[in-house]
Image (cartoon, rainbow, N blue to C red):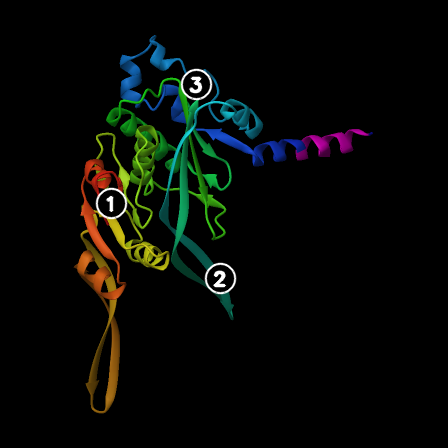
Amino acid sequence: MNEKVLAVILALSLLANLGMGLYIVNDHLYGPGMLPEEYETAKGSDRTSGPSGESGRTIPMADILDTISGQEKRSASLQGLAVITTINYSRQGQFIYQEKNETGTTINVTVDIIPGEGRVLVQTKPLMGIVFQDAANTAVAVARNRTTADFSGSDVIFSITSDSVIPAVDGASAGALMTVITSAAAAGEPLWENRTLTGTITPDGRIGAIGGVIEKARAAKGAGKDLLLLPRENAYIVVLNESSQSRGGLRMTRLVYETVPAKEYIESTIGIRVEFVDTIDEVEAYLFRTGQSE
C-alpha cells in the first residue's frame, strides 16, 4: 500500500471521527458551567479541575456512549426557532444582482446531563458557531446557579436536529431556551411542548433581544405552537407595509416601513399568542408544566 493510499485512508478516518463527535466548548475550561469571572476566584479549587489543554478537541461519540452506558442520564428537549438566510445571485448584462431571503424554521434542541468531567459539549453536526458555544456555556452557568443539582461531576451535551437542511448554527438567540431545558433536565421538570421561546441569556438570567421576530413567529405557528415567548426588548418591531394613492386615474403604491407593537401585530396577522418575558424566572413560569394547566 503506497503512501498516497495511506494518506487518503487517514483523512477519511479523521472525517468520520469528526462526523460522529462532540465539540468541547472553549469556555468549558472555566469549570462546570463557570463564568470567566467566577473562574478567577476559584483557581486551585476542585471546581476548576476541567481537563487542561482540551480546547477545540473532538471527542469520539463512542467514548461518550461508553460514559452514558449503565449510568444516569438526565435529558430535556424543546422545539426552538431559527432563521435560515439564503443569498441568490443573478446576472443581467454586466450587472450581478444579489437577493437575500430569510425564512423561519424550527429546530429541536436537546440537552443531556451525564456523569463526566464538568464539560459543556455541543454536537459537530450541524456545526455550532462560536457565539452559539458561548451561549451554551452561559446557559449552563445560569442553570447551575438556579438549581440544587451538582454539575461538578457532569458533562452537559447540547444537540440540534431539524427537518430543514441546516449546515451550521450560530447566534445567541437560543440562549434562553438552552437555559430552561438545562434547568428542566437537572430538576426533572416536564416542559410544555406546545410552547416555545426565543431570546438571548445574560449571566444574571435576563432575556435579551433577538432578530427575525416575524419569521420565527411564522415558524412557531406553522409548527402548531400556541404560545410564543419573546424578549420584552422586542416589544416593537419594524414591518413593511404598502401605501396606495390614486391621482388622475393612476394608482400609486409605495412601500413604507412602520414601527408597530409586536404582540398585537403577530397575534392579528399570524395567529399565535405572544407573551413578553424579562427573566428566566418568567420563562420557567410559562414553560414548566408542574402545577400548571393549559
Q: Residue at x 36, y 33 (%)?
A: 136
Q: Earlier in the sequence, mark 3 or mark 2?
A: 2
- The percent position of residue 230, horizontal first and vertical second, equals 24, 48
Q: Mark 1: give few (<14), some (14-19) or many (20+) Cα within 10 Å.
A: some
Choose between 285 and 138: the one closer to the eye: 285
Q: Earlier in the sequence, mark 1 or mark 2?
A: 2
Q: Read off the magenta span.
A: 2-12
* Dominant secondary structure of the residues highlighted in magenta in the image: helix
Splitting the image into 4 quarters, where does residue 46 fall?
Answer: top left
Q: Which residue position holds label 1?
A: 209
Q: Tell me if residue 159 comes above or below residue 257 in the rendering.
A: above
Residue type (three-letter) at the residue carrying disc 1: Ala
**Residue lying at the far right of the rendered structure:** 1
Q: Residue at x 72, y 33 (%)?
A: 9
Residue 6 belongs to the span the image colors magenta: yes
Q: Which residue position holds label 2?
A: 89
Residue 180 belongs to the span the image colors magenta: no
Q: Which residue position holds label 3?
A: 117
Q: Tell me if residue 25 comes above or below residue 176 in the rendering.
A: above
Q: Is residue 113 left or right of residue 5?
A: left
Q: Is residue 57 visible?
A: no
- The percent position of residue 12, horizontal first and vertical second, equals 67, 35
Splitting the image into 4 quarters, where does residue 271 fall?
Answer: bottom left
Which mark is in front, 1 or 3?
3
Q: Quadrant of the N terminus?
A: top right
Q: Is residue 118 left or right of residue 180?
A: right
Q: Earlier in the sequence, mark 1 or mark 3?
A: 3
How far separated are the C-alphas under marks 3 and 2? Answer: 47 Å
Splitting the image into 4 quarters, where does residue 50 fall?
Answer: top left
Circle 1/circle 2 CB separation < 8 Å = no
- The percent position of residue 119, horizontal first and vertical second, equals 42, 23
